[in-house]
Amino acid sequence: MKTSWNPIKTAVTLALCGAAFAVAPLQAAEQSTAASTAPAKPAGVTMLPGDDFYAYANGEWMNKTEIPADRGAWGSMYALAEETNARIVKLIEEAAANKSAKPEARKAADFYKAYMDEAAIESAGLNALKPRLAKIDMINDRASLSRVLGEFLRADVDPLNATNFNTPNLFGVWINQGLTDPSRNVPYILQGGIGLPDRAYYLDNSPKMAELRTKYQQYIAQMLKLAGLDNAEQRAAKIFALESELATSHASREESADIQKANNTWTMQDFAAKAPGMDWKAFMKGARLDKQDRFIAYHPGALKGAAAQVAATDLATWKDYLGFHSLNQFASTLPKAYTDLRFEFYGKTLTGSPQQSARWKRALSATNGAMDEAVGKMYVEKYFPAQDKARILKMVADIKTAFERRIDKLEWMAPTTRTQAKEKVRTMYVGVGYPDSWKSYAGLQVSPTDALGNVLRAQEFNYTQQLAKLKQKPKKTEWAMPPQLVNAVNLPLQNALNFPAAILQPPFYDPKASDAHNYGAIGSVIGHEISHSFDDQGAQFDAQGRLRDWWTKEDLAHFKTASQKLVEQYNTYKPFDDLAVNGQLTLSENLSDLAGLAAAYDAFKSSPAGKGTGVEADREFYTGFAQSWRTKMREASMRRAVLTDGHAPGQYRTYTVRNLDSWYKAFDVQPGQKLYLAPEQRVRVW
């Protein structure tokens, strides 16, 4: 049996499973068929809008729709992403067959081709992983352990927009401008290193969580056995115990969303003093960060806890931990037995999906992850006309103007706060469709026959690109999302918005649809992203993206009081008897839904097509908004989302309407109906 992580000593074949290209559960509206005298119900729906507006708008869709077997959740936006992905695959296949295709398009095609070549993956085994496993096997003291942990560090997601703060390596790094100094880029060090989605999975004593922990530990043991290791159960127990200790020191989702708790500037000397146990000099050298003089310790408690475990846990367990996570992280480009094993746990057990995604979907996900803008450039050249960009920019301008007018009408806001709030709106960078300049992939080596090597080289290439930003000035216009992603984002540090091309198509944006439809669909998304600049987190950043208190004491107190009412409102929503929506965790998104929907409505009513319209148009607007959030989720996926996602499930996002007076008028919502709130109980912030 194998006892070492040296792949030279014992030949092993391994594998990892990839997920479909991630999308957020947004979806736009279809036109309402409301009559002029009373709210008409969508076909087949008997629910009154005032009792359950989500069921009223989406009941027929919910009754007819089945979640695909390879999904834990489904919605119209997922379907749009599926259609977009099918288009992209055709473009990739065309590039592969075209000898005159652009170099980066051919490179993306080679990446995809290698991922699809399952026979070559089976034959290669873990050849490309051998250098990584050899590094693990050579660990012989705490300094070499620290160095390897640093070498495995990779660029991570934006913590200000993440729904999952965990990274597959012990830590993650995100590089962007400083929280209080917008003149330079700095590394943010983030918590990570656990295989379950969140600390709650290790610490929650509920029977369901206990069952998941047992199954996860069994999965670790099965992976070790497939790798040829002896005493797999005992080793798995030690790995799980180490992860449990790491999870104990992790920040919760609510704490991670509190930017003030993340504002910790550390020097190199601070790491040794504040997080003893790790050889931080060796770690930083391995991570190629040893020349930096300033860091943001985004999760200081997790850094301290992990460093303590580096000192306290035996080296053999650390080596098993690193070996297991290497196999787990890269399994999608390893042989089938490991891919299937990983899906059994992460797919079936954690999300409830009965069937693994088709190979082409996983291949596209990996290609998007490795060469996102190369793929995006192919997509926009074919599918995003210039006139669509111009029309969306006009809609953005209209909704920004509507938001400024709402600021002007806030009786509670002092003139000094009002002036700075309006400056923030006016100076926003709004990226529509695609970035102003494209990434180059000239230095990335891609082989049409080496899937695992391609993934490893792409990670290294991306990390090197991110490190290069440490010698560059921050860029307000830098994009955080590729054009082919069906999503949108607000970037507080840049005071910027990104609306990728893929979301700017039917049913979100339809040039043939009415203004009521488009303002209710893409307009509410635009308003949502603008409003993120004024949610509980975004409101702490000024127009330059600097973390700064620009509020009067009284204004801030009013804002917090009004926001707390929204927290309490969402705390009452219970998708399960034993699990409620977390109003604090979802506050940022709920505030943005509320303010964004109100601004989109105002912009529509001020537009040439919206002026003078009555309840029919209003019903179309609001029904469109409700239909944009229609989603079906399996129980396992719903529970995971409620525990870990900063967004409330779609049903409860729809209930935003109960805080807007015009919704009551449009649908004649009366006292006694379940969603009715008396005027004084309706949450009013922006």
Image: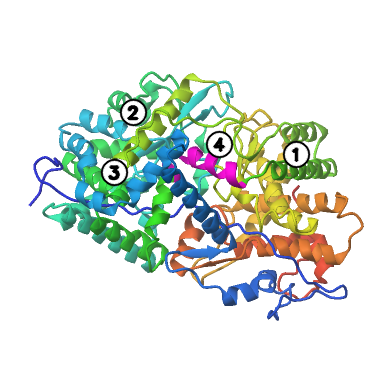
At label 1, counting other C-alpha atoms closer than 10 Å, the crowd grade (few under 14, some 14-19, many 20 or more) is few
Label at residue 260: 4
The residue that disc 1 covers is: 554
Give 370 or 139, whichever is nearer the viewer.
370
**Dot 4 or dot 2, earlier in sequence:** 4
Amino acid residing under circle 1? Glu
Mark 4 or mark 1, which is nearer to you?
4
Amino acid residing under circle 3? Thr
**Residue 102: image location, x then y, percent:** 47, 35
Mark 2 or mark 1, which is nearer to you?
2
Mark 2 or mark 3, which is nearer to you?
3
The residue that disc 2 covers is: 287
Whether the residues at callouts 4 and 1 have beta carbons within 8 Å, the answer is no
375 in the magenta segment: yes
Element type at marker 3? loop
Element type at marker 2? loop
The residue that disc 3 covers is: 449
Magenta range is 368-383
